[in-house]
Image: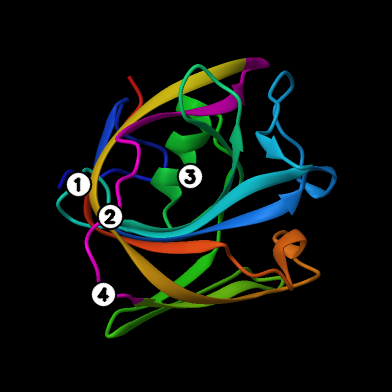
Amino acid sequence: MTRFSPTQFPPEPWNLAGQAYASTWRVPAAELPSLPQGIKPITAGGQAFVVTAWIEYQEQGQLAYHELLSTVAVRGKRTTASITEIWVDSEVSLAGGRALWGIPKDLATLDFRHGRTFTASASTSDDWIATAAFSKRAGAPVPLPARFDIAQTLDGALKHSPVRAKAQPRLASASWNLNPDGPLGYLAGRTPIVSLTLDDFTLRFGS
């Protein structure tokens, strides 16, 4: 894997690989965080859909680091999401995500523990953000879109970035604890409608 200084990052597209643990939530549209201008959430009965994920990018890809993100499903020509909150423990990832795609990455301390149950925590120097535990359920892989777009604001304009992914998504049980006074506080006290593990994924981000 190529090593980059904090002020350098690979050009797009990024080819990444690793493990991910995701949950989908229903949230009243009126309680969503801000979205890029011109972007509208997908809603049903006044409820929008938010996906949160813990992601471990591993050595097989161009970069290796940890990530916690929250995205909102939005209207687009194909499956599209907009990232509203995201934390990484890599200055290279932070710089590249902001410069290439307008992804609002911030730094955090992320602790991942793998085993029969996957556990994770995220915090900044100011406060804790979230903790979670995932346990994989028995059953066949669940089909997910292999291609989707990420819509963000870059240099004052809307940018749609294509993503291609391969994974083995499986249903999981998940328990989240979110700081009600933190940046993901709009999810505190809610229960995910579905959770998944995405084993051994590969990802091509950007064009």
Colour scheme shown: rainbow
Q: Which residue is mark 4?
A: 138
Under circle 3, the secondary element is helix
- Of the two numbered discs 3 and 4 on the same chain, state the one appearing first in sequence: 3
**Rendering coords of residue 177 (x, y %):** 63, 78
- Of the two numbered discs 2 and 4 on the same chain, state the one appearing first in sequence: 2
Label 3 to label 4: alpha-carbon separation: 35 Å
**Residue stretch in magenta:** 136-157
Under circle 4, the secondary element is loop
Under circle 1, the secondary element is loop
Label 1 to label 2: alpha-carbon separation: 7 Å
Q: Are marks 1 and 2 in contact (CB under 8 Å)?
A: yes
Q: Are marks 1 and 4 in contact (CB under 8 Å)?
A: no
**Rendering coords of residue 59 (x, y %):** 18, 56
Residue 58 or residue 45, whichever sits in front = 45
- Of the two numbered discs 3 and 2 on the same chain, state the one appearing first in sequence: 2
Residue 103 visible within the image? yes
Label 3 to label 2: alpha-carbon separation: 12 Å
Residue 57 or residue 185, whichever sits in front = 185
Using a 10 Å C-alpha cutoff, classify the residue at mark 2 as few (fewer than 14 neighbours), some (14 to 19) or many (20 or more). Answer: some
Q: Is residue 5 above or below residue 54?
A: above
